[in-house]
Image (spheres, rainbow, N blue to C red):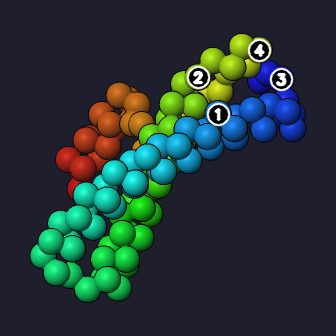
């Protein structure tokens, strides 16, 4: 299958993902929450409501950034290794495949009955 997942490799994968997610979350939420707070203050919204919605914006940006950069890291070449996603064989529902002889036999049996 390949080389095992060592602690050093795991830390390199985590760091490649985490620092991008943290920076993007900080910058993205800073911009979006600032713009929202400006307009919310302009329209006279309650501070508690602005704070709650700001937290939801921050959480949404964090989730989006985390998922986006996870995909980025899965495609990244780390030099001495690369991550890959493989489909397992035999997953999902197995549908029986009828052989041509069997389907003809079933047709003739149905005609008999």
Q: Can you name the residue that lies furthest to the left here?
A: 43
User: Residue at 47% across / 50% down in the picture?
Assistant: 25
What residue does disc 2 label? 76
Q: Secondary structure at mark 1?
A: helix
On-image quarter of the C terminus: bottom left
What residue does disc 1 label? 16
Q: Depth check: give the residue in front, 78 or 57.
A: 57
- Disc 2 or disc 3, which is closer to the eye? 2
Question: Looking at the image, is 27 positioned above or below residue 97?
Answer: below
Q: Is residue 83 left or right of residue 99?
A: right
* Disc ID at residue 80: 4
Question: Looking at the image, is 108 positioned above or below residue 38?
Answer: above
Q: Depth check: give the residue in front, 42 or 7.
A: 42
The answer to whether residue 109 is seen in the rendering is yes
Q: Earlier in the sequence, mark 1 or mark 3?
A: 3
- Disc 4 or disc 1, which is closer to the eye? 1
Q: Secondary structure at mark 4?
A: loop
Q: CA distance from mark 1 to mark 3?
A: 19 Å
Q: Earlier in the sequence, mark 4 or mark 1?
A: 1
Q: CA distance from mark 3 to mark 4?
A: 10 Å
Q: Secondary structure at mark 2?
A: loop
Q: Earlier in the sequence, mark 1 or mark 2?
A: 1
What residue does disc 3 label? 3
Determine which quarter of the picture holds residue 105.
top left
């Amino acid at each position: 299958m390949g080389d095992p997942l060592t602690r050093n490799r795991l830390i390199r994968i985590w760091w490649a993902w985490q620092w991008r997610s943290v920076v993007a979350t900080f910058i993205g939420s800073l911009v979006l929450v600032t713009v929202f707070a400006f307009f919310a203050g302009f329209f006279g919204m309650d501070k508690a409501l602005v704070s709650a919605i700001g937290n939801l914006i921050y959480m949404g940006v964090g989730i989006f950034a985390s998922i986006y950069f996870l995909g980025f890291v899965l495609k990244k070449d780390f030099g001495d290794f690369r991550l890959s996603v493989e489909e397992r064989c035999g997953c999902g529902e197995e549908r029986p495949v009828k052989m041509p002889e069997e389907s003809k036999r079933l047709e003739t049996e149905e005609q008999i009955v």
